Amino acid sequence: MAASKPMTLLSRAASELGVYSILGSTRDTKLLCLQRFIRLFAYGASTLILALFLSSLGVSDARIGLFMTLTLLGDVVISFGLTLFADGLGRRRILVLGAGLMSASGVVFAFSGHYWVLVAASIFGVISPSGNEIGPFRAIEESTLAQLTPSAIRSDIFAWYTLIGTAGTAFGTILCGWVVQALQSLDGWTDTRAYRVIFGLYAFLGILKLGLSLMLSEKCEPEPEQQERHDAVELGAVEAEGLLSDDDEADEAPKPKPKPAPAPAAQQKKKKSIWPQISSSSRAILVKLCLLFAVDSMASGLVPASWVTYFFTRKFALPEGKLGTLFFVTNIISAASNLVASSIAKRIGLIRAMVFTHLPSAIFLALIPLPSAVGLAMTFLILRSCSQSMDQAPRQAFLAAVVLPSERTAVMGVVNVVKTLSQSAGPVVTGWLAGINKFWIVFMLAGAMKASYDLGMLKMFMGHQTQEDRTADER
């Protein structure tokens, strides 16, 4: 009897953390999560040495900044084009194409030293200047995961998807640092040569990701149009029980599932189009979300990891070893916190989970530049990492639920483009403020903008009815 109680508690903890959800997920879901880990591992490794590599080639600081800006702006165009037509051309084809370009860019960086050739390779091959997710991969993967996953465990899957990616960034960063340091200690090895090894690894990881993309099944492709309303009814019946609703209706007797009406013959024979169809109701929601996400992403662009590292070096003269350890710890904490977010979302709803977990991180962000002691500033940074990404899984689940399945890839692609475009404007402002010794304003401004985003989400979408809920009511 005594042995069963710990097992029961352990089983309950595993359920709360979504362990059973990810273990019981489909093979395609596991492959998509593994692809994200590999991709973010590559991003983390390349980001750590990107600026150092360009500097070792004799590129000025101003042109390094221009390089990063052009990469982000170019990514907007590439991501928008690929995600807009991903459902029409085939999701797996786009993922395979992206992985091939990713590998090719690693080869270019490993052998070329021409500035504009590197810029082109960075844009088309998706080299991340910040270590964060860029390119078309995320929108396509999230849309596919939403299709493959029942709504009752969707937030669990998105939480693990986010955790796995953040963990990949953390391990890629720390491994890259130690490998480069070991290579630099060898006789005859220059800094540039050591950096090129990392880009060779980047190319290999791109090939590995390509292989995983080829292993995805036909189930990852968009569902036939006539099945969407039937799927929406089934999803709505589950989500109305509390996962996506703020109302507590668990005590109501379950209603019988209505049978889906057969699709008209003309609709069944309708040829597949590469152009995405977005309903007017979804467009209205998309505009609101893009405005709010733009504010949040602009704030994130003001304080990317590279600028935060520079701030701690400039103000507290922290050595690179301690900085690397500090940011590895914050990434790991941020990854682990995503599991808690899923459990919170099931209890209080997605919007409340997004706001009440993200708002404290905005406050801690604004407090980072105030202390004169490095220990307190590092404490605020670590506290911020405890909840800074806890809103991601609920946000992904909410975005997937407020639009129709056929709209998800295009909508998520537009959202990611808006976020990247907004984020690209941040480093310019930070550079200007840092140049006039007003670095502290950046953290205060970013914190205020992120808090405004949280309150805006609460105001606009609190109690908002999802697409599945509306479909279920119509039935």
Image: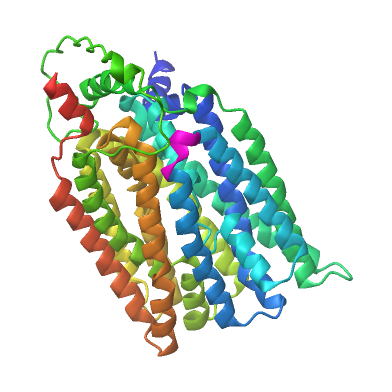
From the top left corner, tell me how far across and down residue 55 is, in percent: 66, 77
Above or below 298: residue 44: above
Q: Quadrant of residue 358?
A: bottom left
Q: Is residue 300 visible?
A: no
Q: Quadrant of the N terminus?
A: top left
> Residue 216: within the magenta?
no
Q: Is residue 50 left or right of residue 355?
A: right
User: Looking at the image, which residue is at 18% across and 56% down?
Assistant: 456
- Which is more toward the observer, 370 or 212? 212
Q: How is the image coloured?
A: rainbow
Q: Main secondary structure of the magenta part?
A: helix
From the top left corner, tell me how far across and down residue 66 is, in percent: 53, 75
- Which is more toward the observer, 344 or 46? 46
From the top left corner, tell me how far across and down residue 380 is, in percent: 37, 66
Q: Residue furthest bottom?
A: 436
- Which is more toward the observer, 70 or 60? 70
From the top left corner, tell me how far across and down residue 310 is, in percent: 51, 76
Above or below 176: residue 155: above
Q: Quadrant of the C terminus?
A: top left
> Residue 87: within the magenta?
yes
Q: Which residues are magenta?
A: 84-89
**Tally of numbered tags:** 0
Above or below 451: residue 459: above
Q: Is residue 186 left or right of residue 353?
A: right
